[in-house]
Amino acid sequence: MNEFSPVDDGDVAVRIAAHDHVADIVEALNDQPRDAAIAALNELPFEQTVDVFDQPDFDDAAEIMGMLPRDQATRLLSAMSVDRAADIIREFPDDERGAMLGALDPMLRHTLLNILGYPEGSAGSIMTTEYVSVPSDWTVARTLEHIRKVERTRETVYAIYIVEPTTHALLRAIGLRRLITGAPDDKIVSIAPDRQPVTASPLMDVEKVAQLITKYDLLAVPVVEGDQILGIVTVDDIIDTMIEETTEDVHRFGGMEALDEPYMKMRFLPMISKRGGWLCALFLSEMLTASVMQHYEVELEKAIVLTLFIPLIMSSGGNSGSQATSLVIRALALREISLSDWWRVALRELPSGLVLGTMLGLVGVARITLWQHLGFYDYGSHWYLIAATVGVALIGIVTFGSLTGSMLPFILKRLGFDPASASAPFVATLVDVTGLAIYFSVALVILRGTLL
């Protein structure tokens, strides 16, 4: 693919129009300033422009649509896939949304309003009404002829839904491969799998829809209310939605709010606001570590050597907690575990933390012993007690970190929060504070009467 750089609008339009694949055109348009992108779109054939707006990867589609003449925007929305048109209209400001919907064909407007009425993240909000359905008394030949006629106006033709001729209740689902292997005169219902189709309700969370598609190896899931099919959710819609949600979770794992736009398009002040709030909250939390150290100020004055291992102690606890949190959040997202499994997770993490803590404790003890005997550092006559303090503290801190990190997502989910909010920095901060308290408490017990 050719590389594009901002040049005059005419040159950009010609070079973008030279692309054959819509994905390449979208990538090239995304690299251009807004005015150059609009100029290039105006040079594309109408069908190709529709394909561009149909791509979820087309950045700022709603804003660019809003800058086009109203009649052109209306034509584009009418020609696009319904689910993508709903996505774009959803991003319009309220006043513009009403005006744009008012300019559309009444039937299309009714369909879009139905989709827009469902909450974001639900099956109804991403479904399309452009699917293939046929009465149960049709033959294979008639069904194939129908597919040939409507193919260009349907999201997919690989899943065909069989409905009752009078009530239009969903009866069966059949794949295109099975359909074309049937005899022309066979009734379509006779060659369809003899089982109820896998369906989703319009309010089902998209993550659950994704699990249905994965579990049953489907290309699309019909969205059904009562026994009536409202639309379908296709696998490509699910992929786009899950990429979006996964991106949000990754941002939260990093200890910040999810970005509303691609990283390179995010303006400076909004970027600061997304990151600054969490950083300040984490910083204020970390200030508790200073309070803990002040509480043990006398002990630190007596045994300055203990301060050498504070970074080691804090990082080990935070790392173990972050590991456990990441594992549990992902397991919850994939429905591998549920809220009622918290005690099973605790029973797994407790021995895991003890073993991992023992491993790190032995490494810490070995390091102090080697440094002492090789002459790299003199920890004093009670070096073996310092080594024991570090070893025992690591066992306690890593165990506590693993247990806390695994339980925090359950607590947040029970309280109605997103478990992804139990991000690695948040867990690390929590374990840092408690880790110091564990470390100094162990030191008081082991070093009492010697260094303390």
Image (cartoon, rainbow, N blue to C red):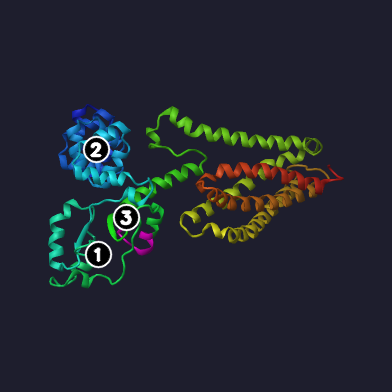
The quadrant of the rendering that contains the N terminus is: top left
The residue singled out by tag 3 in the image is 235
> Does 159 sit above or below residue 73?
below
Q: Where is residue 277 in the image (x, y as percent from the top left)?
A: 53, 33
The answer to whether any part of residue 251 appears in the image is: yes
Residue type of the residue flagged with mark 2: Leu
Magenta region, residue range: 212-223
* First reached walking from the N terminus: tag 2 or tag 1: 2
Q: Nearer the viewer, residue 232 or 263?
A: 232
Q: Nearer the viewer, residue 203 or 314?
A: 203
The residue singled out by tag 1 in the image is 175
Residue type of the residue flagged with mark 1: Gly
CA separation, marks 2 and 3?
Answer: 27 Å
CA separation, marks 3 and 1?
Answer: 14 Å
Q: How crowded is mark 2: few (under 14 residues within 10 Å), some or many (20 or more)?
A: some
Mark linked to residue 101: 2
CA separation, marks 2 and 1?
Answer: 35 Å
> Does 86 sit above or below residue 166?
above
Q: Position of residue 201 (x, y in %)?
A: 35, 56
Q: Which of 230 and 158 is in front in this view?
A: 230
Say whether marks 2 and 3 touch (CB < 8 Å). Answer: no
Left or right: 349 in relation to 326: right
Q: How crowded is mark 1: few (under 14 residues within 10 Å), some or many (20 or more)?
A: some
Quarter where residue 140 is shown = bottom left
Residue type of the residue flagged with mark 3: Val
SS at circle 2: helix
SS at circle 3: helix
Left or right: 317 in relation to 28: right
